[in-house]
Image: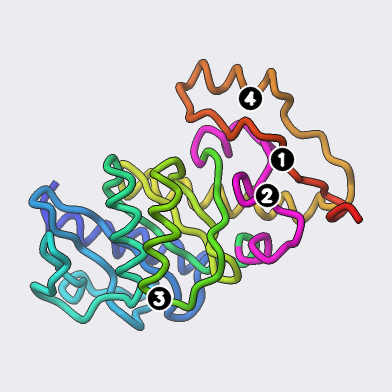
Amino acid sequence: MSEARSREDICRFGRSLFERGLTPGSSGNISLRLEDGGWLVTPTNASLGFLDPVRITRLDAEGRLVSGDPPTKEIPLHSALYESRQSARAIVHLHSTHSVAVSMLPEIDPRAVLPAMTAYYLMRVGPTALVPYHRPGDPEITKAIKGLAGKYAAVLLANHGPVVAGESLESAVFAVEELEETAKLYLLLRGLNPRYLTPAQVADLTKVFGLSAPPSEPHAHDPAGPAD
């Protein structure tokens, strides 16, 4: 795919996410890794709904500015995820309401913030980790991301929002949308003792679709809240 087409795709997907209220104002950022090892990334203080393809930031393989506007302050986050997920070609970070809300709940398991609620959550997103709070742009986030050892394509930043890596921009966007919808379902059903997928159903999906196996440790999900 040409760089010009990649720039247009970032703008097109960004506008779609913005227009559906998935990342308000100038929040959120998108990056796309290019064939030469460089990146395209949305500029700092840019609304995803009003991106200009010419002003998209171009970085070289070492993260140095080549052209366009100054990049998002979240470069350390993107860099760490690309480094730990070698298959990643695109990253989408949003401030979507329901995912942010879930990241604040006391009962969620940092190894698997959402239970196996639907087949498409497992198929498009997979296990999602919680990363402890860091201020936006904090270089220390790289340690937290690298500490996950590349096991997660999706993470929730505590009190901040979701970050999803994909093998294409389209797959990353679809995954972050599915993550937001699953977070919404979790909040709607919290306290109602919903029926999640069984271990056998999860195993079947994992086998048939070649999914990453979820963490094997017991989880602490309790829709009613944490135990006393």
Q: How is the image coloured?
A: rainbow
Quick one: label 3 or label 1, which is nearer the N terminus?
3
Q: Which of marks 4 and 1 is in front?
A: 1
Within 10 Å of the Cα at label 1, are there few (<14), some (14-19), or many (20+) other Cα atoms? some
Image spot of residue 184 (x, y percent): 69, 55
Within 10 Å of the Cα at label 2, are there few (<14), some (14-19), or many (20+) other Cα atoms? some
Question: Residue 194 is drawn in which quadrant?
Answer: top right
**Disc 3 from disc 1: Cα separation:** 29 Å
Marker disc for residue 219: 1
Quick one: label 3 or label 4, which is nearer the N terminus?
3
Identify the amino acid type marked 3: Asp
Q: Are marks 2 and 1 in contact (CB under 8 Å)?
A: yes
Quadrant, the C terminus:
bottom right
Within 10 Å of the Cα at label 3, are there few (<14), some (14-19), or many (20+) other Cα atoms? some
Return the residue nearer the eye: 148 or 137.
Answer: 148
Answer with left or right where residue 144 lies relative to residue 8.
Answer: right
Image spot of residue 110 (x, y percent): 62, 52
Return the residue nearer the eye: 40 or 22.
Answer: 40
User: Which residue, given by chain and number where applicable, does mark 4 sit on?
Assistant: 202
User: Which residue, given by chain and number where applicable, does mark 2 sit on?
Assistant: 109
Decide: is 64 above or below 120.
below
User: Which residue, given by chain and number where applicable, does mark 3 sit on?
Assistant: 138
Q: Residue at x 36, y 45 (%)?
A: 166
Image spot of residue 183 (x, y percent): 66, 53
Q: Is residue 113 magenta?
A: yes
**Disc 3 from disc 2: Cα separation:** 23 Å
**Disc 2 from disc 1: Cα separation:** 6 Å
Return the residue nearer the eye: 223 or 149.
Answer: 149
The stretch of residues the image draws in magenta is 100-125
